[in-house]
């Protein structure tokens, strides 16, 4: 998957990952893909819910090295 932007939210607790996600995706162009990494377990439900609410496409979620990795396509 081609990633256009990366966002490191490791060590941040709710609501900071979503706030940073929102600010970062606003700067991106429609169709670009953001890779977000975080350690807050709440992000596993928060990120897909945020995508549904904002019209961005939740592509994939995986775990690696103790972090959650999310792929989001800007709507």
Image: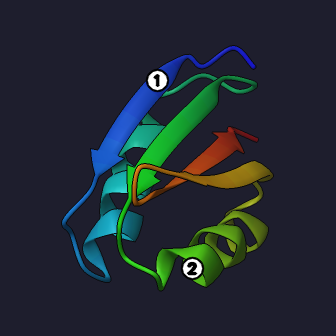
**Image side of residue 66 versus residue 57, left or right:** left
Where residue 21 sits: x, y (%)? 42, 54
Q: How far apart are labels 2 and 1 at the CA level? A: 20 Å
Q: Quadrant of the C terminus?
A: top right
**Local SS, label 2:** helix
Q: Nearer the viewer, residue 15 or 8?
A: 8
Where residue 32 sits: x, y (%)? 66, 23
**Image side of residue 22 versus residue 31, left or right:** left
- Mark 2 Cα-neighbour bin, 10 Å: few <14, some 14–19, many ≥20: some
Q: Which residue is rendered at x = 62% and y = 72% of the image?
A: 50
* Residue identifier under label 1: 5
Residue at the front extreme, as displayed? 65
- Mark 1 Cα-neighbour bin, 10 Å: few <14, some 14–19, many ≥20: few
Colour setup of the view: rainbow
Q: Which residue is rendered at x = 70% and y = 27% of the image?
A: 30
Q: Is residue 3 above or below residue 42?
A: above
Where residue 28 sits: x, y (%)? 51, 27
Q: Which residue is rendered at x = 70% and y = 55% of the image?
A: 61
Number of numbered markers: 2
Q: For the residues labelled 2 and 1, say whether their Cβ atoms are less than 8 Å apart.
A: no
Q: Is residue 30 above or below residue 70?
A: above
Q: Is residue 29 above or below residue 41?
A: above
Where residue 55 sits: x, y (%)? 77, 58
* Residue identifier under label 2: 46
Q: Quadrant of the N terminus?
A: top right
**Image side of residue 59 versus residue 4, left or right:** right
């Amino acid at each position: 998957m081609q990633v256009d932007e990366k966002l490191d939210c490791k060590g941040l607790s709710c609501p900071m990952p979503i706030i940073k996600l929102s600010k970062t995706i606003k700067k991106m162009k429609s169709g670009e893909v953001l890779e977000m990494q975080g350690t807050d377990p709440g992000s596993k439900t928060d990120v897909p819910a945020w995508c549904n609410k904002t019209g961005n496409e939740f592509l994939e979620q995986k775990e690696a090295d103790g972090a959650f990795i999310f792929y989001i396509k800007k709507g």
